[in-house]
Image (spheres, rainbow, N blue to C red):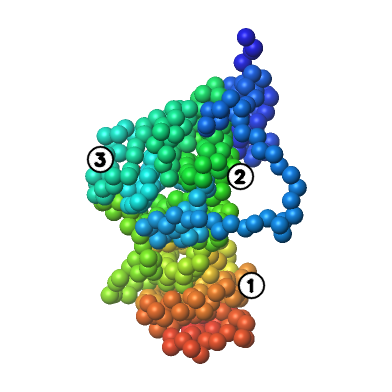
């Protein structure tokens, strides 16, 4: 009997090393190496989903690209417009899609709900996490019935492929990749080598059978679980499901897509009976209020390709400690510090003796730099304790010298603000001359510097 071979794998990035090391040379994380059994010497071949003796070897030869016949990729449309959108227009046949997200965010709910709602095709939901009864209870809660929905609670890929051969499904969902194990590899489920091997088997299955496969994978913030990160290059599409567990809103983002744009994004709300599609995000991200409060400003942002109006809340108070506090939720803390420094230096405001708290409504993380101007105005409004009108919104990036910089897709932002009934929008005066802004009824205020904004508002 040959000796069992082992290797050390970084659980964060999948880096393989013959010896244990404290710090991963690839991703620089500490203490992430775990010894895993691999059997490279006795089993070089992978498990073939058709279980033939020889893995399928295709003869390849050089071809002229112009001579290759293009085939229209066939897509399955789901009843969920948000999911279709992030996939680039439906599920592509034979594609392998990885869906990552923190535990408890709603990945199982999203895919169970969609699988149940998909009519006319046979769907196999493989769960290694929950029992049949648990899934039944969840399906009852979602309140959708589907006779073409089949359930398999199994974790061995060999068994799974055998069942697939019997059932011949048109769509397979695996929940989650961390629970699967392949008999070809000796290490524990969830380890880097297992996760890689089981994904490779599913990939071969998807490509050869043309059945699309969805793989659900857990990610933790610190990457403690062998991450779907190590799988990203193996799959066609990577979706990320994110949001704050304490808020109802969830965002489904495209991280990678071989069949569409990565700028897409889907928005959902978690309700008592499943996830609800949010087709008009602006309406929920702005709290409906009658009275005007200081420290609130509305930003006209664009996430992915979608314009969204988002409420920014700031609280500026006298600091009671020597070191003033700065806290930001949904916004980069360093960016907040930078904006405070700009206000201190260019506007002469004394934020150095103030505590500053900043919050983006709805628990949503915003990366669009155009939110800067709204953040700045909410800070000023709270500093002065003067409310801003709730019919005003902002779109502009703030530069280090206090200038308000132009942002992309300004017309789309203005149109969204107008649609939602805003009366005034502040934008940078440095937008290109060619813009046709006369078509808008909303009042557009071009501003060049922070001081100018302050003068116009207070
Ligand atoms: P789940 O899909 O199990 O998360 P994941 O698969 O990403 O780990 O969903 C987790 C949360 O969603 C759970 O805390 C309960 C909540 N939930 C609802 O609020 N409404 C529902 O209808 C369902 C099914 C779940
Ligand atoms: Mg789950």
Q: Is residue 447 visible?
A: yes
Q: Is residue 124 above or below residue 181?
A: below
Q: Earlier in the sequence, mark 2 or mark 1?
A: 2
Image location (x, y in percent) of residue 238 = 53, 49
Query: Which numbered marker is on residue 401?
Result: 1
Nearer to me, 146 or 302: 146
Query: Which numbered marker is on residue 135?
Result: none
Image location (x, y in percent) of residue 361 = 39, 62
Q: For the N terminus, which image quadrant? A: top right
Other-residue count near label 1 (Cα within 10 Å), few / some / many at <14 / 14–19 / ≥20: few
The Cα–Cα distance between marks 2 and 1, rounded to whole angstroms, is 41 Å
Which residue appears at 52% of the width and 38% of the height? 205
**Residue underneath mark 2:** 233
Q: Tell me whether circle 3 and circle 1 mark residues in contact (CB < 8 Å).
A: no
Which residue appears at 36% of the width and 58% of the height? 79
The Cα–Cα distance between marks 3 and 2, rounded to whole angstroms, is 35 Å
Image location (x, y in percent) of residue 4 = 61, 16
Which residue appears at 55% of the width and 74% of the height? 409
Q: Earlier in the sequence, mark 3 or mark 1?
A: 3
Q: Residue furthest bottom?
A: 438
Other-residue count near label 3 (Cα within 10 Å), few / some / many at <14 / 14–19 / ≥20: few
Badge nearest the viewer, 2 or 1: 2
Query: Which numbered marker is on residue 137?
Result: 3
Q: Earlier in the sequence, mark 3 or mark 2?
A: 3
Image location (x, y in percent) of residue 14 = 61, 35
**Marker count (numbered):** 3
Which residue appears at 37% of the width and 68% of the height? 280
Left or right: residue 168 versus residue 398 is left
């Amino acid at each position: 009997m040959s000796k069992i071979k082992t290797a050390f794998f970084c659980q964060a990035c999948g880096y393989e090393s013959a010896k244990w090391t404290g710090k991963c040379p690839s991703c620089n994380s500490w203490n992430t190496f775990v010894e895993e059994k691999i059997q490279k010497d006795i089993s070089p071949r992978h498990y073939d989903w058709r279980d033939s003796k020889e893995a399928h070897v295709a003869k390849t030869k050089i071809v002229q690209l112009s001579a290759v016949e293009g085939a229209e990729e066939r897509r399955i449309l789901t009843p969920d417009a948000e999911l279709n959108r992030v996939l680039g227009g439906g599920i592509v046949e034979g594609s392998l899609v990885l869906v990552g997200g923190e535990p408890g965010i709603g990945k199982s709910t999203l895919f169970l709900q969609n699988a149940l709602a998909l009519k006319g095709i046979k769907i196999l939901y493989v769960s290694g996490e929950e029992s049949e009864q648990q899934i039944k209870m969840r399906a009852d809660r979602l309140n959708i019935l589907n006779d073409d929905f089949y359930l398999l609670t199994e974790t061995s890929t060999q068994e799974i492929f055998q069942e697939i051969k019997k059932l011949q499904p048109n769509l397979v969902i695996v929940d989650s990749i961390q629970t699967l194990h392949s008999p070809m590899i000796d290490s524990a489920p969830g380890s880097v080598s297992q996760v890689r091997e089981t994904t490779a088997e599913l990939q071969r299955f998807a490509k050869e059978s043309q059945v699309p496969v969805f793989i659900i994978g857990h990610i933790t913030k610190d990457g403690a679980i062998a991450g779907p990160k190590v799988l990203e290059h193996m799959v066609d599409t990577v979706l990320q499901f994110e949001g704050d567990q304490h808020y109802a809103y969830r965002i489904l983002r495209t991280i990678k897509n071989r069949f569409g744009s990565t700028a897409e994004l889907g928005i959902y709300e978690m309700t008592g009976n499943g996830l609800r599609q949010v087709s008009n995000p602006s309406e929920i991200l702005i709290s409906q209020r009658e009275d005007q409060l200081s420290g609130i400003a509305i930003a006209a942002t664009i996430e992915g390709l979608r314009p969204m109006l988002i409420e920014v809340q700031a609280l500026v108070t006298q600091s009671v400690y020597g070191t003033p506090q700065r806290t930001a939720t949904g916004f980069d803390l360093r960016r907040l510090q930078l904006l405070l420094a700009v206000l201190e230096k260019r506007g002469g405001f004394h934020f150095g003796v103030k505590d500053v708290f900043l919050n983006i409504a709805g628990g949503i993380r915003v990366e669009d730099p155009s939110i800067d101007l709204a953040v700045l105005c909410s800070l000023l409004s709270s500093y002065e304790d003067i409310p801003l009108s709730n019919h005003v919104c902002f779109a502009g990036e703030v530069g280090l010298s206090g200038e308000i910089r132009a942002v992309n897709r300004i017309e789309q932002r203005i149109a969204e603000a107008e649609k939602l009934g805003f009366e005034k929008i502040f934008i940078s005066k440095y937008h290109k001359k060619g813009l046709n802004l006369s078509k808008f009824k909303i009042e557009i205020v071009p501003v060049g510097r922070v001081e100018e904004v302050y003068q116009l508002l207070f």
